[in-house]
Amino acid sequence: HKKLGVVFLITDHESFPIYHPCEDSSWLPHRASLRHESRRPGIKAHIVRTESRGPKSAMYTTYVIHVKTAFHVRGVSRRFSDFAVLDRKLRAKYPNAPELVRTNRILGTLSPGFVQERRQQLQDYLDALLANHQLAHSDIARNFLALHGVMQDPASMPQPAPESMSGGAKEEGIEQEETFWEYTDNSLAEFLSQLSQCKSARDAPQEARLLNKVGLIMCEKGKQTEGIVHLQRAVSSSRLVNDRRSLLRCLSNLACAHFKFGGRLLAVELLEEAIELAQRLGDARAEAGCLRVMALAQAADGDMAQGLKRMLEAGELYASVSDVRGQAATKFCEGVMQYDLGNSVEGVTAMEKSLVLRRTLKDKIGIAEVLNRLGLALVDIGYHLQALDYFERALALCQEEGDVSGEASTLRLLAYVHFAQVDGDRKMSLQLFERSLALARANADVSGQATCHEGVADVLMDMDDSKLALEHYSQALLLRETRVVPADPQAHTRHIQLLRSKLSRAKAQVLEASEGMSDAEGGDFLWRNNAGLGALDSDGELAPIAEGVENRAAPQIIDTGIAYYKELATNAVSMALTKLWS
């Protein structure tokens, strides 16, 4: 039975920290490490051609601009006078705005040489303008590029409110975004000291809160027994003072602690008690949250079908209270589970619904996450060109939000898709892997670094540079064996075996080359297929792709590149890779 990997985050709800489990490749942890200084506008504008218009006695040149964001693609035509007006308005409001290059030339303004020179000057002006986050998202620039009405920068949007187990959202239909609980190395000692004072003062409600915090920190530090004991005491204190809201949260945390350390059956029992309590409180949102955790616990234990059933129940409860954020999260998990069960059409359909909900929330990181998953589904059915478009849209969103982890992950996927096409661009693939590797290093992402080294080596092997590929395979193997902490030990072991097999093949080719021998096998290193299907509608919007996915056993959707292609090999799409791995 396939098991779902799960990671545990801690979110803060009114100074009451709560475990928030999510599937192991979720982008939710990215929100805790956004780099606002790295944010770049997600708008691209290229002058694709020029046109001469007007009567012969008064002809003028227009510049056709191809404008692309993560959500829309459109063309606009502008004259030089329009650029001059834009420049005047921007510089009046933003003195540091780039200056438009002007000329006093009167004659010969329609000559090909002059038009081409001005086109390049205008392109440089647009590039400088869109490189500035403030200018690119100003109303003046957006109107010039005909982007009024298109999703804007989150800084100018009303911020939604946090998901909580306390019931009652601040704004109907939109729960607040998760706030991560932060603690320092001194927090544990501080909370223990406060706990002693509470006991002396016989402040049971505050004691329950502090026991919960101490238990969570101990669990995070790997002190399993002590952590669970403190969480159990938190449950007992909540029962003692008959604080049912606190009891609900403490039961959920205790269940998640057992879940985290392998006691999934006990976790399900505690969650069932929490669900009954939420029903007595009439808190459908809290009940849905407990059902979602139970679904993850069952899926992590190998019972994916039962986990999916619970996840569907959670989604219905979120819908009953118009909790859009909860619906989006459960639809996304539903899609992952359906795909793991081999229900490709249902999985993609659920993710597309999650995409619509996240667009309603203006959740750009969430949108990018879904676009990445849908892009992988397109790769699975051979629509590489459309997958590239999805990945590029996701990349623009990551760059706009300063999500370095998401950007690195998306760059890796772009690199693999460029490489996997029949006429794949190997140089482009190498460049994308190198950019992803630099980001992974900056973000201290060891697993990402290992994946990039492996990807670079795969491309180099296809380019017959086995000597340099050997170095990258060796580096990838070293990182995975010594520094990567596996979420799934069995999958990690299989990946290590795969890497050793690739390493052996590279060594053999280096030896053959040194002896003047040629590779008798030949052929491409990876399968390639450039089949395509229009996945965009006439306005450049993302069209549904579920109807393009065959209902068959499908690989697990993951974002780690070569491991994804390994799963594809089991579906007989790559005889070449199957031979190499054997």
Image (cartoon, rainbow, N blue to C red):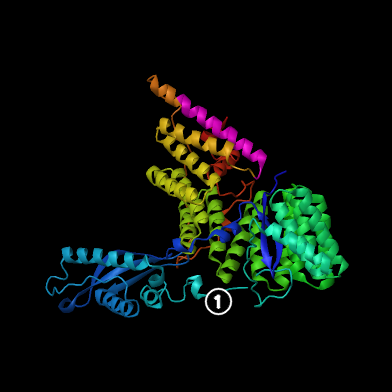
Q: Residue 545 vs residue 136: left or right?
A: right
Image location of residue 145, percent across then percent down: 37, 72
| Residue furthest out toward the top | 515
Q: Magenta stretch: give its range.
A: 487-508
Q: Residue 467 vs residue 334: left or right?
A: left
Q: Residue 242 vs residue 360: left or right?
A: right
Q: Is residue 497 magenta?
A: yes
Tell me what residue is drawn at x 45 percent, y 33 percent: 471
Q: Quadrant of the C terminus?
A: top right
Of 284 and 90, the residue lying toward us = 90
Image location of residue 468, percent across then percent down: 41, 33
Decide whether the magenta segment is chiefly helix, strand or loop: helix
Q: Quadrant of the N terminus?
A: top right
**Vertical placement of 402 versus 94: above or below?**
above
Q: Which residue is mark 1?
A: 158
- Amino acid type at mark 1: Pro
Image location of residue 124, percent across then percent down: 28, 64
**Vertical placement of 413 versus 538: above or below?**
above
**Vertical placement of 135 versus 252: above or below?**
below
**Secondary structure of residue under mark 1:** loop
Quadrant in the picture for residue 272: bottom right
- How many numbered badges does the structure rendering display? 1
Tell me what residue is drawn at x 62 percent, y 47 percent: 556
Q: Residue 188 vs residue 266: left or right?
A: left
Q: Can residue 305 be spotted in the picture?
A: no
**Vertical placement of 90 versus 314: above or below?**
below
Of 535 and 557, the residue lying toward us = 557
Tell me what residue is drawn at x 56 percent, y 55 percent: 373
